[in-house]
Image: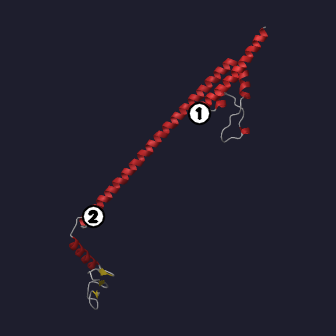
Amino acid sequence: MSSIGGGGGGGSLARGSLDGGGHHYGLFPHAAWQQQQQQQQESVGSSPAQSPQFTETGKRRKDGSSGTESSQAARILEDRRRRNASASARFRRRRNERERGLMRRCEFLEQQLLEAVGPRVFDDVMRSAPAVLRDDEEPAASPPPTSVCALTAPRTLDDVWAAYLALAQQVADSAERITGLEASAKS
């Protein structure tokens, strides 16, 4: 190993040493570093990837492509957000339409039952109906229903039909009793 730069400091390298292969180790001044880079380029051969001009262009290309990629990713995310928002809006609209349809059906059935049995019998049937319990309510917090809509409190179409069938059975039983009482009163 030999010291480069000779004795007192007349060389371009302040401190450093060469190994057997001519490589520098230690602290390098800028001029020595440039020399080493030139030697390496000559020994390996100049490739476009190592030229400073191509590297800067490559960086620009890479920066431009990452900008394009990030803008494309932003467009994809925005499109996904927009599609999810429109799907959520469609779901809410359909749910609201379904609930309005169920409420109209309940009101229609209630009106038909009121006309068929009269308000007094209807009120008696509704008072004897079990209270509708929600998942988050206590049994004491739920009063007896006062209408078919309150009785059914539809969660699904099956719930509406089950409540309607139960109410229809109660009304049919009441109607039979009324018919029987009227027949016995006439005789």
Residue labelled with disc 2: 56
| Kind of element beneath mark 1 | loop
Identify residue type, mark 2.
Glu
Tag 2 or tag 1, which sits nearer the N-term?
A: 2
Residue 80: image x %, image y %? 43, 45
Residue labelled with disc 1: 156
Horizontal relation, residue 123 to residue 8: left or right? right
* Quarter of the N terminus within the rendering: bottom left
Tell me what residue is drawn at x 54 percent, y 34 percent: 95
Horizontal relation, residue 67 to residue 137: left or right? left
Residue 114: image x %, image y %? 67, 21
Identify residue type, mark 1.
Thr
Q: Is 77 placed above or below 160 here?
A: below
Horizontal relation, residue 128 to residue 98: left or right? right
| Kind of element beneath mark 2 | helix
Q: Nearer the viewer, residue 169 or 99?
A: 169
Tell me what residue is drawn at x 29 percent, y 81 percent: 24
Which quadrant of the view contains residue 147? top right
- Determine the CA span between mark 1 and mark 2: 65 Å
Q: Nearer the viewer, mark 1 or mark 2?
A: 1
Number of residues whose C-alpha sits closer than 10 Å to that of mark 2, classed few (under 14), some (14–19) or many (20 or more): few
